[in-house]
Amino acid sequence: MMFALITLGVFIIMEGVSWFTHKYVMHGFGWFLHEDHHQPKYDGFEKNDLFFAIFAIPSMALFFFGTYTEYSYLLFIGLGIMCYGIAYFTIHDVLIHQRFKWFKNTNNAYLKGLRKAHKIHHKNMGKKDSQCFGMLFVPFKYFKKPKLN
């Protein structure tokens, strides 16, 4: 039970790490890697995809040290990071950007809200003045249905 809580806790914390990294690293000194992701049309791999590898390295190291030392809880920290990476990939690359055509149409209000928030983020093509840096937890205003007149 404790290991499941560690994994879940790390998964939740990773949303904060992702938000912070997106706002201050990707839209900061790491813009040279993230910039191509904000271009109107992109195909194939982007420099931005290197951020997946950057997050995978600590996860793999934690798997290793959690398996081959007495600190087995490290494996579950690595598992939480990996699970967040899978969720991020599924939401960001598959659902939102349709880099893979697996879930083209959805009527799920939560997923539609995530998609709407990310579109707002991409309205600004530049490094500055972007908003909505989260991926799985975004402001409630993106989940509201527009009022019909």
Image: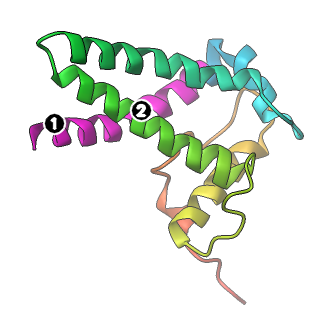
Q: Residue furthest front?
A: 68
Image quarter hosting the C terminus: bottom right
Residue type for callout 2: Met
Q: Where's residue 51, x and y in %?
A: 60, 22
Numbered badge on residue 149? none
The amino acid type found where label 1 is placed reads Phe
Image point 63% across, 71% down: which residue? 106
Residue 15 in view in this figure: no
Where, quadrant-wise, is the N terminus in this rendering?
top left
Residue 143 part of the magenta-drawn span: no
Q: What residue is pinned by disc 1?
A: 3
Q: Based on the displayed image, in which of its 4 quarters is residue 3 positioned?
A: top left
- The tag earlier along the polypeptide, 1 or 2, is 1
Depth check: 100 or 26 in front?
100
Which residue is depicted at the point 82% across and 33% down? 44
Decide if residue 55 is on the left or right side of residue 146.
left
Q: Residue at x 76, y 32 (%)?
A: 37
Q: Magenta segment, which residues?
A: 1-25
Residue 24 location (% of width, % of height)? 55, 22
In the rendered view, tell whether residue 96 sits above or below residue 54: below
What whole-number distance in Å separates the C-alpha atoms at marks 1 and 2? 14 Å
Q: Which residue is mark 2?
A: 82
Residue 129 falls left or right of residue 114: right
Task: Mark 2: give few (<14), some (14-19) or many (20+) Cα within 10 Å.
Answer: many
